[in-house]
Amino acid sequence: MAVGLASSFLEPLEATSIHGTIGQLICLTEWMDQLGAGERYNATAARQVEDFRDFVRLHYVSERRDTAYWRDVTASHPPVVTERLEKWSRKFPSREDFEPFPLGLAHVQEQLYVPVLNGLGLLSQDLARAEMARDPKLRQRARETHASLVAEYSRAAEKCLPHRAWLESLHKETVA
Ligand SMILES: Cc1cc2nc3c(=O)[nH]c(=O)nc-3n(C[C@H](O)[C@H](O)[C@H](O)COP(=O)(O)OP(=O)(O)OC[C@H]3O[C@@H](n4cnc5c(N)ncnc54)[C@H](O)[C@@H]3O)c2cc1C
């Protein structure tokens, strides 16, 4: 059994390492006195890193084809990435689209995919609206979450120096 960087490494675009390691340790301690723990642990660790890889690969879905690099990236997406994108062009991503992770541990699921898809312009706004219309409670929760985030960030921003003022304060310290 291998844990952390000894088990796998992925480029840190999504910083999955610490979360992954904690998940591995939970599985290890939960299963270590059971028969077949090694196989179970290794299969789970392999699934974990493959799911992280697919999530990281999503970030490389781009319309760029202007260099050999981007053409190669586009031609080599894991099939699950293109299959999911095709599925999510017809339905809004949901928890049911993901195989549950062992021990009910938090994993890369719709809660992480939706913001990334949205940022990449790959989330259909029409599907999002239809999802809200289908479930009034969801719309209400989305409104409340949005309002509380705006309030929280506004409170934090009020306490912060503007970026330029902060840089100028550093410059003054350096000159002094
Ligand atoms: C600047 C920076 C920012 C990061 N930010 C994030 C983040 O935001 N989120 C995230 O998830 N991850 C982040 N990471 C990655 C994450 O910190 C590492 O992947 C994680 O700490 C690796 O833990 P590990 O225990 O597997 O390996 P390590 O922390 O590398 O531990 C390996 C240990 O083994 C020891 N060792 C090596 N060789 C031997 C030997 N022959 N004998 C005995 N001991 C040995 C080393 O001294 C070390 O103590 C970041 C990393 C860096 C550098």
Image: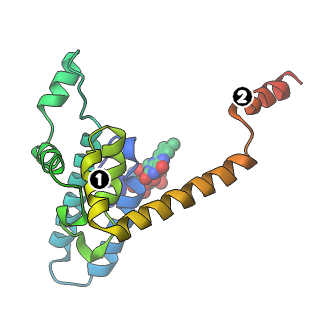
Q: Is residue 128 left or right of residue 165?
A: left
User: Which labelled disc corresponds to residue 128?
Assistant: 1
Q: Is residue 124 left or right of residue 149?
A: left
Mark found first going from the N terminus, 1 or 2: 1
Residue at 18% x, 50% y is 88
Q: Are marks 1 and 2 in contact (CB under 8 Å)?
A: no
The quadrant of the picture occupied by the N terminus is: bottom left
Three-letter amino acid code of the residue under disc 1: Ala
Res. 172 in view: yes
Where residue 71 appears, as percent x and y from the top left, is: 17, 22
Where residue 95 appears, as percent x and y from the top left, is: 24, 65
Residue at 33% x, 61% y is 3
Q: Is residue 8 left or right of residue 140?
A: left
Task: Tell me the mark number nearer the camera, choosing from 1 and 2.
Answer: 1
Q: Which residue, as the protein is rendered here, is positioned at the far right?
A: 176
Q: Which residue, as the protein is rendered here, is positioned at the far top?
A: 66
Where residue 176 appears, as percent x and y from the top left, is: 89, 25
Q: Is residue 98 left or right of residue 104?
A: left
**Which residue corresponds to mark 2?**
164
Query: Looking at the image, what colour scheme do you see?
Result: rainbow
- Distance between the Cα atoms at labels 1 and 2? 37 Å
Badge 2 local density, few (<14 within 10 Å), some, or many (20+)? few
Question: Relative to 33, does residue 167 appear above or below in the rendering?
Answer: above
Where residue 56 appears, as percent x and y from the top left, is: 29, 44
Badge 1 local density, few (<14 within 10 Å), some, or many (20+)? some
Considering the numbered disc 1 on the image, is that residue within a helix, a strand or a loop? helix
Residue at 29% x, 75% y is 104
User: Which labelled disc corresponds to residue 106?
Assistant: none
Question: Relative to 152, does residue 81 appear above or below in the rendering?
Answer: above
